[in-house]
Amino acid sequence: MDGNKDRMFDSGTLHGGEDDSDLRRGPWTVEEDIILINYIANHGDGRWNSLARCAGLKRTGKSCRLRWLNYLRPDVRRGNITLEEQLLILELHSRWGNRWSKIAQQLPGRTDNEIKNYWRTRVQKHAKQLKCDVNSKQFKDTMRYLWMPRLVERIQAAAVSSVAASAVVDGSGSYGSVTPTPPALMMNGGSDFVSTPQVTPSYTSENSSSGGGGGSSDGTQVSSVSELTDCYNNFSCNFPAGYEQDAGAGAASMQSPAGGLFFNEGTLDFQAMQQSSCEWMAGDGGVDTSESLWNGAGADYFWFLQQQLN
DNA sequence: AAAGCATTCAACCGCAATGCG
DNA sequence: GCGCATTGCGGTTGAATGCTT
């Protein structure tokens, strides 16, 4: 359908002569959230225009749908993007580009909006710091050969430390319950990744409790962190021989955040790139070690909502 | 303390695709 | 096949928040 109809849809003029002044815009209130949650609990979702009307919400159907899918849906995961999720996003974006919803399908509980925001605020920021285009070969190579392996290292380190911790606690070395995980990344011919839809890490770098002993009795393959990271370690081993020279030769200058060149007169300054990589993942734009909004105030909000619904 | 700047992310916009009568 | 209603998606905006000076 064309834009005119959609503007009508958005503006609410489809709603029997309502005008824009009847429609609320901007942030949702707690009351609106409760109304929407209650209505969907009783009647289900879909048919968003009539849902908005019947629920008595002065919102467009589109707004209701977005609020539900991106925020109120019970299976939406909130909080920091985990290391594993970051890895997946980088990999899947390299393969699919800005197909946010497709990428989001591989990260259960994450919305396309969240992934898109992550990409724009974190990844694109670092491309900007490197003074290269996010779609450039240099940036993609930096992601693939430095940042992604570095993420793997961190995932592995987190897994090892959590295994050690759990071994201390229960003395068994078992990893606790197996949780749903996003697709494992597997090597394809040694040079590409393919995803398999069996697994989903629901652990975070901070709270990871599953480390290595995946597998299930029902035949479903459950990938563990170590399996996941092994794939990447294998990949790291397959780091193209002479890549440094290849990447440097003929490549445009690539600057480190500090202003130094990664590619300088045909020589790739790997140390500088790795430094940048470390800064990204350990520092400002990477893994937030602080409690996230949703681990804190957001959780309170949902508790409050729950109280209102009870 | 407060002003200015930077960052984040919920929400909106526009368009394309799909479903249905 | 056509027109309308609805859904889905990607891009963009702007308010809220955090950080720096």
Image (spheres, coloured by chain):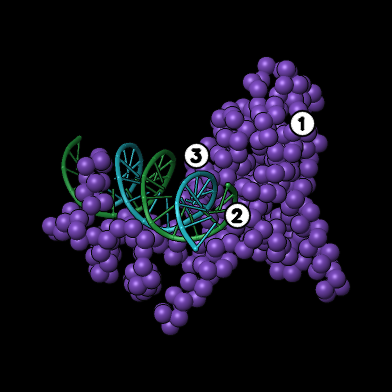
Chain colours: A purple, B cyan, C green
Look at the numbered disc 3 and give the secondary structure of its residue.
Answer: loop
Residue position for label 3: A98
Query: Tag 1: residue type?
Result: Phe
Are both tags, 1 and 2, on one chain? yes
Q: Residue at x 74, y 69 (%)?
A: A176
What SS does tag 2 mark? loop
Label 1: which residue?
A: A270
Chain containing the residue with disc 3? A
Quarter of the figure with the C terminus of chain A: bottom left
Using the image as rendered, state which of residue A30 and residue A275 is in the foreground. Answer: A275
Residue visible at 36% across and 68% down? A29
Residue indicated by mark 2: A81
Name the residue type under label 2.
Ile
Residue at image point 44% right, 75% down? A305
| Mark 1 belongs to chain | A
Residues flagged by tags 2 and 3 on a common chain = yes
In the displayed orientation, state which residue is furthest to the bottom. A310
Residue A285's place in the image compared with A68, above or below, is above
Residue A161 x/y as whole percent: 81, 60
Q: Is residue A54 above or below residue A120?
A: below
Q: Is residue A10 visible?
A: yes
CA–CA distance between discs 3 and 1? 28 Å
Q: Amino acid at mark 3?
A: Asn
Q: Circle 2 marks a residue in which chain? A: A
The reply to whether callout 2 and callout 3 are in contact (CB within 8 Å) is no
